[in-house]
Image (cartoon, helix red, strand yellow):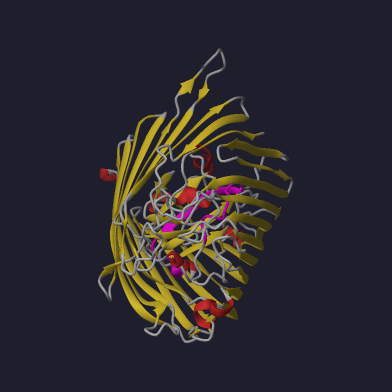
């Protein structure tokens, strides 16, 4: 994993990799201003996990890949496929927006609008980009803590048929794999990936709980992703209409998994999570490439069902169903402005869109039934500018206006700057802005029996944040960086004193630092250490926010020496260890359990813990690579959330090929 100052690839019509005549410029990224810009000139703290990182580090799910990202705290209530919440820079899990190729994919039927990071397999993902900090001025609602974007595999431009695949198996009766192919035939390109995972899993209940029976919670997961594209024409300096790109994607995913009803193992408690997602987008270059305009139509459907049958421990039954839908249209533009004098690389971005969400749910017992049946629509417009002055100072600015008839209007802004100091091989970055999280459909219209009603008059949760940091290159052998961030969040949604509805009542203050050191003593060795310090407190009660530890650290290395054993040609053996440390974390009242399974009505702490993973890869042929993955080598079973433990030790052997 390489932590850089990058920014998120936003809407793919603005930069569709694999298109002819509309390729991103090498060594640049599409920034939070939506303009391809060199990485060192972007004022946003971002981690990029590319395809090589995913394979060499043995990342299978999105939760695996994000666990070591600076500022990211992953809390998974069980093993693969089970609920995994992401807390980014100390904000709530509902304050992280997740995108697929630039399109929001958070489930509208989730009661708080949070994303389950334990669901997504990575066989069809080219790279993952994590933008930290408030970016609602670019992405809209939920981007208080940041944004995660999953970018789909792209077709090679120089091959008509390029197959790839992986097959692996190991402990816990685990069998996984993916297979796919991509290519370009004239103006047409395509890609398709199928993937699956089956595992017996681990028992998620903490061993200290007396009612623990050791019942494992398995997972069966499958997904199919298909993408096609067509590029027409080409862009020339005097062309009114240049290259036009048309692209479509359709993805299906379904997971079936076991659950535990903490504090008691429950062998009859299962869940199923199904998702359909797709988009159709166009991108055209006008006026010799000076103006790029694109349109995206997208749709998503989520269906989650949880069933609990009677057993010897309990005669209670449950059949909970959540259905969420999202439909959206987005129009995005980049206008490149001619420079002059000290002003260069000037661009203006602008656009707007419309979105419709629907949520239907019914969960819980007949006497404590939680239901939602609601819809809402919203629209937005945005404007951004970017320019460089005197080949040293990069300035970015963005403003967005969201309008929803149901909960009102919300303006957000963001400013950022990067000052290059080549005399000392350093860069200073600073940014600030506002962000918001719109109330979910459950929060506005949900019901519990006859005693609770959602509040349709809720306002969005709002934040004001700023950050400042530096990055210095110590020759070509090392890079060191440090950053301080500060956020104030108001109008947080919580229960009123009678627990009969929800109100905007809470406030939070979050501040901390992100520190990173990368050393490269040789071309075959690199080591990156990251440490995040976070102080997140409820401003009203002056108490720490739950599940947000003060200290989280990670250490990643990549060792790639050349080896030549048993007379075989010399090749690169890649060894990739990863160590993640999580400090003691607060736990909220009634979310903690004693060893006898009774809940504790006061707040407390979960002890600290660590995980050590190791992956090794060795090419067998020019196209085939063997690998071994050992996760949680120390077999630690610490509790990221009270009474839930991390999965134990596992080992996987496999083969991976790109042909």
As rendered, which of 603 and 122 lies closer to the eye? 603
Q: Is residue 68 in view?
A: yes
Q: In the image, which residues are magenta?
A: 116-137
From what the image shows, is residue 135 above or below residue 117?
Answer: below
Name which residue lies at 44% across and 59% down: 86
Q: Point out the image quarter for the C terminus.
A: top right
Give the quadrant of residue 644. Answer: bottom left
Q: Point out the image quarter for the N terminus.
A: top left
Name of the residue lying farthest toward the front: 312
Give the quadrant of residue 103. Answer: bottom right
Q: Does the magenta stretch include residue 117?
A: yes
As rendered, which of 414 and 356 lies closer to the eye? 356
As rendered, which of 292 and 31 lies closer to the eye? 31
Q: Can you give x and y, in whole percent of width and height, for residue 497 in the image?
A: 36, 84
Name of the residue lying farthest toward the top: 567
As rendered, which of 485 and 340 lies closer to the eye? 485
Q: Is residue 154 magenta?
A: no
Name which residue lies at 47% across and 87% down: 457
| Total marks in image | 0
């Amino acid at each position: 994993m390489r932590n850089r100052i990058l920014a998120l690839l936003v809407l793919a019509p603005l930069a569709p990799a694999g298109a002819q005549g509309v390729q991103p410029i090498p060594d640049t990224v599409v920034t939070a201003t939506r303009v391809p810009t060199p990485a060192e000139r972007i004022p946003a703290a971002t981690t990029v996990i590319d395809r090589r990182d995913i394979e060499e580090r043995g990342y299978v799910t999105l939760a695996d890949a994000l666990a070591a990202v600076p500022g990211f705290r992953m809390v998974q209530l069980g093993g693969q496929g089970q609920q995994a919440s992401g807390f980014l820079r100390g904000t709530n899990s509902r304050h992280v927006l997740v995108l697929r190729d630039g399109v929001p994919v958070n489930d509208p039927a989730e009661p708080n609008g949070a994303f389950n990071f334990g669901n997504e397999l990575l066989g069809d993902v080219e790279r993952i980009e994590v933008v930290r900090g408030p970016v609602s001025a670019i992405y809209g609602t939920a981007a208080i803590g940041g944004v995660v974007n999953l970018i789909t595999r792209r077709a090679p431009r120089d091959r008509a048929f390029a197959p790839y695949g992986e097959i692996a198996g190991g402990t816990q009766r685990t069998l996984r794999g993916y297979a796919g192919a991509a290519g370009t035939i004239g103006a047409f390109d395509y890609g398709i990936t199928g993937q699956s995972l089956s595992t017996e899993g681990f028992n998620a209940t903490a061993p200290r709980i007396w009612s623990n029976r050791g019942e494992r919670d398995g997972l069966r997961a499958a997904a199919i992703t298909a993408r096609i594209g067509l590029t027409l024409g080409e862009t020339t300096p005097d062309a009114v209409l240049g290259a036009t790109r048309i692209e479509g994607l359709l993805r299906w995913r379904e997971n079936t998994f076991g659950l535990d009803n903490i504090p008691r193992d429950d062998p009859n408690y299962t869940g199923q999570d199904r998702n359909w997602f797709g988009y159709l987008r166009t991108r055209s270059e006008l006026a010799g490439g000076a103006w790029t305009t694109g349109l995206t139509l997208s749709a998503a459907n989520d269906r989650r069902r949880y069933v609990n049958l009677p057993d010897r421990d309990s005669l209670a039954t449950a059949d909970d169903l959540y259905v969420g839908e999202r439909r959206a249209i987005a129009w995005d533009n980049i206008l490149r402005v001619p420079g002059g004098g000290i002003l260069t690389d000037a661009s203006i971005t602008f656009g707007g869109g419309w979105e419709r969400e629907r949520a239907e749910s019914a969960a819980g017992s007949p006497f404590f039934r939680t239901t939602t049946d609601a819809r809402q629509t919203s629209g937005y417009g945005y404007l951004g500018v970017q320019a460089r002055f005197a080949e040293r100072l990069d300035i970015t600015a963005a403003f967005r206006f969201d309008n929803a008839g149901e909960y009102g209007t919300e303006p957000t802004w963001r400013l950022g700057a990067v000052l290059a100091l080549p005399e000392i091989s350093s860069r200073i970055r600073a940014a600030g802005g506002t962000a918001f999280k719109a109330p979910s459909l459950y929060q506005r219209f949900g019901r519990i029996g006859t005693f609770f009603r959602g509040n349709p008059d809720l306002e969005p949760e709002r934040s004001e944040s700023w950050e400042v940091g530096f990055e210095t290159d110590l020759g070509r052998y090392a890079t060191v960086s440090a950053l301080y961030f500060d956020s104030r969040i108001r109008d947080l949604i919580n229960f009123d004193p009678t627990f009969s509805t929800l109100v905007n009542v809470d406030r939070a203050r979050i501040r901390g630092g992100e520190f990173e050191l990368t050393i490269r003593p040789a071309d075959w060795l690199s080591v990156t250490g990251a440490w995040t310090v976070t102080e997140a407190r409820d401003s009203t009660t002056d108490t720490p926010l739950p599940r947000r530890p003060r200290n989280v650290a990670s250490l990643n290395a990549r060792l790639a020496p050349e080896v030549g054993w048993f007379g075989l040609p010399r090749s690169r053996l890649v060894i990739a260890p990863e160590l993640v440390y999580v400090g003691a974390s607060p736990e909220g009242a009634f979310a903690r359990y004693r060893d006898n399974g009774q809940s504790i009505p006061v707040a407390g702490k979960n002890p600290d813990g660590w995980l050590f993973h190791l992956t090794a890869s060795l090419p067998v042929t020019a196209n085939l690579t063997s690998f071994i993955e050992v996760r949680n080598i120390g077999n630690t079973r610490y509790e990221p959330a009270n009474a839930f433990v991390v999965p134990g030790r596992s080992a996987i052997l496999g083969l991976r090929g790109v042909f």
